[in-house]
Image (cartoon, rainbow, N blue to C red):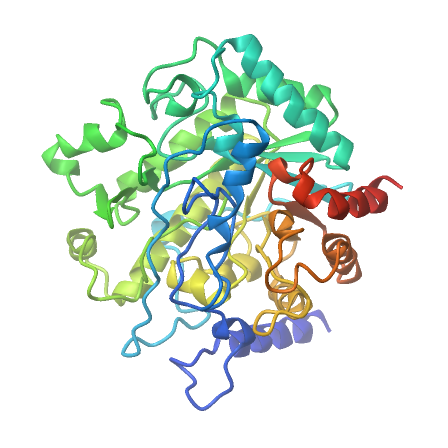
Amino acid sequence: MKKWRKIAAAVLAAAMLCTTAACSGSPQQVEDSVVTSSSVSSETASESSSSALTEPESAQEPESSQIAQATEEDSSAQAPAAPEDSQPPVETESSESALTEGTVSSPSYNEPAAATPVVQEEEMRAVWVPFLSLDMTKETDKSYTAFQKKFNDIIAKAKASGANTLVVHVRSHGDAYYPSSYYPWTHFLSGTQGVGPGYDPLAYMVSATHQAGLKFHAWFNPLRIKAGNYPPVVASNSPYNLWKSDPTKANWTFTHNGSIYMNPGYSGVRDYIVNGIKEVVQKYDVDGVQFDDYFYPFNVNSTDVTLDQAAYQQSGSTLSIGAWRTQNINSLVSSVYKMIKETKPNVVFGISPQGNITNDLNAGADVYTWCSQPGYIDYICPQIYWTYDHPTAPFETLAKKWKSLVTADNVKMYIGLALYKAGTDSNGWEKADNIIAQQIQTTRSLDCDGFMLYSWAYLDNPQTAKEMANVKKLLNG
C-alpha cells in the first residue's frame, strides 16, 4: 500500500510541476498566474522598506519583501536605511523547456547523506529576526551591554507572543555575526565590514535564547556578498576580494545588476560555503540552520546570462545550462545537510522558499526533489504570503499544494506567514484582523508541523496590534 501511495504522490508531483512552457495545452497552475517575472527575494529587496522573507505577489502588487523593514526600523526609532536594490526580475524564456521532476540529481561525488530522523516534540512557532533587527550602526551606544539589551527585547517580545523558536540572521551579506575563519565581521555591528564589535554576538544570542526556553535557528544567505549599499564597502578579507586577486579563483564570484554573489558552479565555492556553516554548527549550540529563498538571482534557464559560462564549460557537464545550475544548488543543499548530520545529527536543516513554485524553479531551487527525496532537508517552510481570497494565489490552495509535495520520510512542513502584511489595506488584508490566526488554524487542519512569522518587528507594532491580539489568544489561551 505504501508503495502505491508513493507512486501516486510522484504522479501528482509531476503533474503539478507542469507549467505553460512544458504543457501549453494544460491549464496553468495557480501559482503560475502569480507574476513569474518578479524577483526571487527574501529579507532584503528595498531595505528602506523591507527585509521580509517574501515571494512575488501579482503583476499589480509590489514585491512583498519591499514593505517590511521600514516599519522595523521605525519601531526601533532608527533612521531609514539606504535602499537596497531588489533582486532583478526572473526572466521566462519560452524557448527553454520547464524543469521536470527527476531530471536533476546530485553528482556521484556528492551523494546526499542518508536521512536522519529529528524528533520534533512540539508545534513549530518561529519568528524570523532579520539583520536590520540586529543593526547597531545607528545606535549611539554600540557596547556589548547595548547589544544584549537589544537582543533581550527580541527574546522577550517573541516569547510573549507565544513563539518557541527564533530564526536569526547570522550571515546576510557574505559576513558573520561571530568571529569567523571564512567571512569578515558584518558591518551591521560596527559600521564597517571586517571590523569586529569586541564581543561574540552569536554566542550571546544562542545562550540567551536557550535560557529563555526558546530554540535558535541560524539563518544564512549562502550566495549573496553585496547588494545595494549593504555593505557600503566590502572588506579586504571578504572572499570576494581574496578570490578576485587569485587567477585560479577569479570567476568564483559574479556581479549581476550591481550585486555580488558567490558562484555555486564551482565545487570549491560550494565547499567554502559548507565549511563556513560548519564552523557555526561546531562552535555554537544552534538548534537549526536555515536558508531562505535567495539562490540564483536570475532565471537559471536563461542562455543570455553568461556570468557563469566559464564554470559551465569547465565542468564538462552534458546537462542543459538550467539543469546544471539547478544541480549546483542541489549539490550545495545536500552537502550542507550531510555536513550537519556528520557534525551534530540533532541539528536540523531547513529551507524557506518562495510560495510561488515556478519562481523557485527559475532560481534553481528544486523544491520537488528536496520535498520528495531523503538527504536534502529536515524541513521546508514555503512563504505563503497571501490571503484566502487572493485571486491568483489563495492561501489554502497553495498550502494544500505544498503539503502534497512533502512525501519524503522525516521532512517536516512549516508555513511562512506574512505578519508584516496584517493591518495593511491591500489585497484582502484589510478585510479582517484575524487572518494570521486563521492561517495558523489552517496549518493545523492540514497536519503541518508549525509555522514561522515574518517578522519580529511586527509582534509588537501598532499596525498589527489587533491581528497579534488574536494570534496570542490562539497560542497562549
Instruction: Decide: is 32 above or below 347.
Output: below
Q: Position of residue 115 (x, y in %)?
A: 58, 48
**Side of 52 where 223 appears, left or right:** left
Instruction: Decide: is 437 above or below 76.
Output: below
Which quadrant is the N terminus positioned in? bottom right
- Decide if residue 434 is in sight here: yes
Which quadrant is the C terminus positioned in? top right
Instruction: Decide: is 322 above or below 459.
Output: below
Q: Residue furthest right?
A: 477
Q: How many marks?
A: 0
Q: Position of residue 287 (x, y in %)?
A: 62, 32
- Decide if residue 290 is in sight here: no
Instruction: Decide: is 138 above or below 98.
Output: above
351 and 2: which is toward the camera: 351
**Side of 175 where 470 appears, left or right:** right
Q: Position of residue 471 (x, y in %)?
A: 78, 46
Q: Residue furthest bottom?
A: 25
Q: Residue furthest left?
A: 247
Q: Position of residue 77 (x, y in %)?
A: 55, 26
425 and 266: which is toward the camera: 425
47 and 212: which is toward the camera: 47
**Side of 303 where 276 appears, left or right:** right
What's the residue at 35%, 49% (across, down)? 109
What's the residue at 38%, 52% (across, down)? 329
What's the residue at 36%, 59% (across, down)? 326
The image quarter containing residue 234 is: top left
The image quarter containing residue 268 is: top left
